[in-house]
Image (tube, helix red, strand yellow):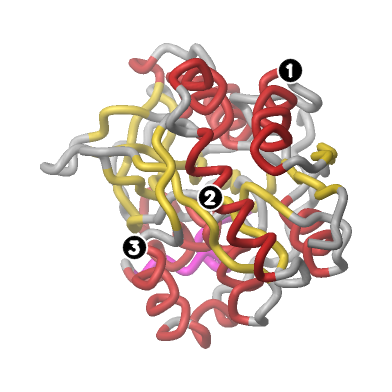
Amino acid sequence: MGVDRIVLGFVPTDRLGARDARTRLFARALEERLGLYVVERNVATYDELEQAVTGGRIDLAWLPPLVFARLDRRGIATALATVVRPGEAFWSVLVTSRVSGIDRLDAEQLRGRRIAWVDPLSASGHVVARLGLAARGIDPRTTFSAESFAGSHAEALNAALEGRADVAATFARCDAEGRVVHGPWDEAGMRPEEVVVLGLLGEVPPDLIAASRLLPRELLDAVGAAVVDASKDESLAPVLQAIFGGTKLVPGAPASYSALCDLLDRSSGAMEAFASTSPPDTLGGA
């Protein structure tokens, strides 16, 4: 195939730290199946991850749907596999603390409040959340007194619970009736009773594994097959759960990804109109 190594890229998450031993185990599983050296590379943000894939510095990456959509539309990356989370839908939600005094998703209750987003390229923690608020007549530019990027779902949630923000955009998993069954508060060990889910803002497809189209077609096919085959190894189940939030990986992009692309196409003007008013990169302690 003319390639002796590939670079696997990650953004450390609330669930998985930088250079986590479990990502190394996953890399070794790929090495065994491909006969290639797999180098792990951690970057700090989704934007860095997108730039690294665009520049050919990362060959294979675990990507949120919005980042993949941007790379896919430019012909830079292709989807190899998606994690399956049966029975639960992934939603963008707006949350607050039990003591904030906010009890519903209402423009008047949110006016003058501070919001914590996750990352500019986070679907559930920013983009879909902004679109969902806009669809309800809540313009983030004029409704909120301050906007900040917290850097992770746990940090955005912490900002709302600790009073550094009044509300936070994050994710939740819901059952078929739309009831919230899981959220970042569970992964971070927070008490669920401290968190108030004000409303669902929009469904978000799961993250996926994508590869640079700079790789030879034969190698792309081989890497995709290796990823899916690794998910069939029961001994790797705890590793896959820690990295991807699920143990079953299926080929290609999820069906819900096309729905997100349709939303972005229909809302391209709205996304520009509701662009953030230059929030700082991270939340401070004040």
The amino acid type of the residue labelled 2 equals: Ala
x, y percent for residue 194: 40, 18
Q: Which is nearer the N-term, disc 3 or disc 1? A: 1
The amino acid type of the residue labelled 1 equals: Ala
Vertical placement of 212 versus 185: above or below? below
- Depth check, mark 3 against mark 1: the one in front is 1
| Direction left: furthest residue | 177
Which of the numbered marks, if any, corresponds to residue 225?
2
Disc 3 to disc 1, C-alpha distance = 31 Å
The structure residue drawn at horizontal position 56% and vertical position 21%, both measured from the top left corner, is 239
Instruction: Looking at the picture, tell me which residue is in the foreground, 167 or 218.
Output: 218
The boundaries of the magenta stretch are 137-146
The residue indicated by pointer 1 is: 21
Residue 139 shown in magenta: yes
The structure residue drawn at horizontal position 40% and vertical position 30%, both measured from the top left corner, is 183
Vertical placement of 88 versus 212: above or below? above
The structure residue drawn at horizontal position 79% and vertical position 35%, both measured from the top left corner, is 284
